[in-house]
Image (spheres, rainbow, N blue to C red):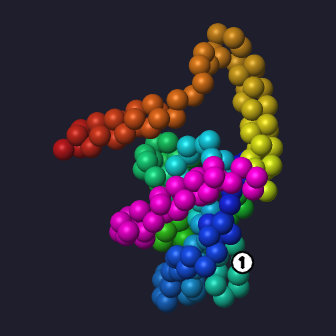
Amino acid sequence: MTAYVDYEDLFPGSQETRHLQVLSDPVLPADKYVLEERYCADPACDCRRARLEVVSARTRRLLAVVCYAFDDDPAETPDEQNPYLEPMASQGRHAPGLRDLVAHVIENDAAYRKRLERHYHDVKRFMADHPDHDLHRAVSADRRVMTAFATGIVEGLGPATAPSRPRDHAMERRKRKQRRQSRKRNRR
């Protein structure tokens, strides 16, 4: 339950929305698919991911919600794929095929990957520089809900398994990177 913001809402007129045209495909219907970018609005959160809402240009219906983690460690995603279908979102009938289409684009377009990461940093900077923005109320509410949820889990585990220190996201990213590098070396 994270407060997400549409990139176009913070930066109107940026004209950087990605469109994917499918003319003939055995899995997906012919359509123009719009990838609407959403990012976590919490400037203190270092989730390093983009949420791409795949919308039909023809019907304007949301068909899939695909998340892309910049650190690219599939083991850290819900279904061990990156990008992955957001498990908490309602997904359309063609969501798996749309996830595959988005994965193909991300895998083969380095400029698009860099743009998503740049947009992530743009949003984080904007939210940090605008503490009076309306979204900060949603971020505060989200933090309260998530803290209560996490506290309930930790209390349920008992004192022997409770974390002794706050989470170090930078350290976790370094460990994930080391695991990826180790797996790559082992493949060779």
Q: Can residue 28 be seen from the camera position used here?
A: no
- Is label 1 in a helix, a strand or a loop? loop
Residue at the extreme top of the image, as rendered: 160
Residue at the extreme left of the image, as rendered: 188
Task: Tell me where residue 46 appears, x and y as whole percent.
Answer: 55, 43
Instruction: Considering the whole magenta stretch, tell me its main secondary structure.
Output: helix
Question: Please, is residue 161 above or below residue 23 in the view?
Answer: above
Question: Please, is residue 28 above or below residue 6 in the view?
Answer: below
User: Is residue 96 inside the magenta stretch?
Assistant: no
Task: Tell me where residue 127 appears, x and y as whole percent.
Answer: 65, 53
Task: Classify mark 1: residues with Cα within 10 Å, few (<14), some (14-19) or many (20+).
Answer: few
Which residues fall within the magenta stretch?
A: 105-133
Counting the numbered discs, the total is 1
Which residue is drawn at the image coordinates 45% and 66% (left, top)?
Answer: 115
**Amino acid of disc 1:** Arg
Task: Tell me where residue 95 appears, x and y as whole percent.
Answer: 60, 67
| Left/right of residue 158 with respect to residue 180 in the rendered view | right
Which residue is drawn at the image coordinates 49% and 47% (left, top)?
Answer: 80
Task: Tell me where residue 30 appears, x and y as whole percent.
Answer: 56, 87
Which residue is drawn at the image coordinates 48% and 71% (left, top)?
Answer: 101
In this view of the protein, which residue sits in the foreground, 67 or 63? 67
| Left/right of residue 80 with respect to residue 144 in the rendered view | left
- Please identify the quarter of the rendering in which residue 6 is found: bottom right
Question: Please, is residue 9 above or below residue 29 in the view?
Answer: above
In this view of the protein, which residue sits in the foreground, 9 or 176? 9
Which residue is drawn at the image coordinates 40% and 35% (left, top)?
Answer: 174
Which quadrant holds the C terminus?
top left
Q: Which residue is mark 1?
A: 61
Q: Can residue 110 be seen from the camera position used here?
A: yes
- Please identify the quarter of the rendering in which residue 31 is found: bottom right
